[in-house]
Amino acid sequence: MVFILRVSHGKVFSTDAEKLKTPKRGDPVSVSTLHHDYEKSRFELYENGVMAGFLQYDTGRDTLFLKHTFIIPAHRGHGLAFALIERVLDDMHRRRLSIQPECPIVAEFLRTHQQYLGLVVTGRAATGRHLPAHEHRTA
């Protein structure tokens, strides 16, 4: 799954028509893509073909446990962490999956973007965690 984001003067805009802004002439523009790496259990954000960060998760039955958001230092300060989280949550909504935010940055995002709170599962419904594929052990 790939989403295109455009960054202009440090502001991130998605490809959604209502959010996409046309940059002014001379504005620096970079293209960001979101890649779901199933083997590493993470969503990776690439900016102009270079990894800018990722959101690590564990899986449950119908729930993703969002563990850790990381933006590479050279890419920080441009709103990419929130842009990454927003794209992941939009994908979870489309796929009708729930989330359990364990990452403080995801929790902060949810406090300011309450339209995503319907994705959050708590208590018993959040049980049933599975180990990521790379952590499965054989006897």
Image (cartoon, rainbow, N blue to C red):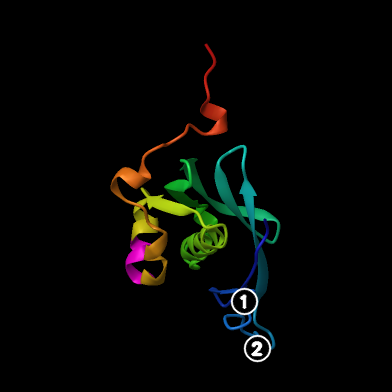
Q: Secondary structure at mark 2?
A: loop
Q: Residue at x 49, y 61 (%)?
A: 89
Closer-to-camera residue (34/90) = 90
- Structural crowding at the residue carrying mark 1, measured as other residues with C-alpha within 10 Å and reported as few (<14), some (14–19) or many (≥20): few
- Cβ atoms at labels 1 and 2 below 8 Å apart: no
Q: Residue at x 69, y 88 (%)?
A: 25
Q: Residue at x 66, y 54 (%)?
A: 50
Residue furthest out toward the bottom:
24
Q: Amino acid at mark 2?
A: Lys
Cα distance in 3D space between marks 1 and 2:
19 Å
Q: Is residue 59 above or below residue 30?
A: above
Tag on residue 104?
Answer: none
Residue furthest out toward the top:
139
Q: Is residue 9 above or below residue 100?
A: below
Asked which quadrant contains residue 5, the reply is: bottom right
Overall secondary structure of the magenta section: helix
Give the residue at mark 2.
Answer: 24
Left of 91 or right of it: where is 1? right
Residue extent of the magenta highlight:
108-113
Give the residue at mark 1.
Answer: 16
Closer-to-camera residue (60/26) = 60
Identify the image quadrant of the N terminus: bottom right
